Image (tube, rainbow, N blue to C red):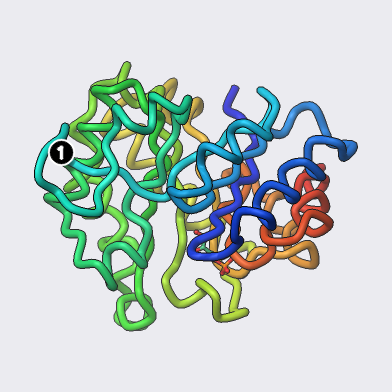
Amino acid sequence: MRKKIVAGNWKMNQNKAEAVSFIEALVKEDKPQDVQMMIAPSYVMLDACKQAATDELVIASQNISQHDKGAYTGEVSADMLKSIGVKTAIIGHSERRSIFGETHEILAEKVKQAINNSIQVVFCVGESLEEREAEKAESTVKSQLEDSLFFLSEIEMKNVIIAYEPVWAIGTGKTASPEQAQEMHAFIRSLIVDKYNQHVADATSILYGGSVKPSNAKELFAQPDVDGGLVGGASLKVDSFVELLHSFK
Ligand code: 13P
């Protein structure tokens, strides 16, 4: 069956001393064996975090270039990530979409680039507040998946984790209710059944993101189709990250 996962997306937080001391403290903590831990620091901290981490902790990048190599100032390639042992990348975070203009086409190229280089993808989807209020939440998420992810083959989908992050819940303190999260996660799983099959749908972890914290994680993670969280703010302190790891039944 699919994995339970708690992934910390540090965004543009934690300098080197903070990042490394977090990882060193985390590896010493008592943690549940059946929950996959993941931390996505900034690019410049990846190597140091990787060196401080043990095998039980996945160190992921927050982004990846869609290009192999060449004149792309400021970009980081799949080959560069692999050369420091990073094998997972977040793709399509709403901040990348809205602030940095990453389109469906660019995201599809990034997914292709990652998968072709055996890099696991954490693919983010989620609707804005206007889209939810206009009852377009499901159609938005459906087209995000269809336009940038569902070209993958059944075998390639084994290397994909999906994160549902409603934009209105990110960094706002406003969490989707457990029912809202479950409804969208079940919808996403049904889309995977329609596009692929039940086996692929059952094997794909779908994480919820958007103001997840120790006080709401238990209820969210208890939903049958919520397989864990992609967490921003509450992943920056070891104590709260460890509490999240212990928030599964
Ligand atoms: P917050 O947990 O800070 O709302 O951020 C969520 C997120 O964007 C994780 O990718």
Q: Quadrant of residue 80?
A: top left
**In the shown orientation, is residue 134 left or right of residue 49?**
left
Percent across and percent down for residue 136 are: 29, 71
Q: Nearer the viewer, residue 26 or 109?
A: 26
Q: Residue furthest front?
A: 17
Q: Residue furthest right?
A: 30
Vertical side of 23 occupied by 9: above or below: below
Mark 1 — residue?
67
Q: Within 10 Å of the Cα at label 1, are there few (<14), some (14-19), or many (20+) other Cα atoms?
A: some
Percent across and percent down for residue 42 are: 48, 53
Residue at 60% x, 46% y is: 7
Vertical side of 42 occupied by 215: above or below: below
Residue at 42% x, 71% y is: 167
Amino acid type assigned to the residue bearing label 1 in the image:
His
Percent across and percent down for residue 165 are: 46, 61
Q: Quadrant of residue 25?
A: top right
Q: Quadrant of the C terminus?
A: top right
Task: Determine whether the residue tagged by mark 1 lies in a helix, strand or loop.
Answer: loop
Q: Quadrant of residue 51?
A: top right
Tally of numbered tags: 1
Residue at 26% x, 61% y is: 139
Q: Quadrant of the N terminus?
A: top right
Percent across and percent down for residue 8 are: 60, 52
Instruction: Report ligand 1 position as a quadrant.
Output: bottom right
Vertical side of 94 occupied by 159: above or below: above
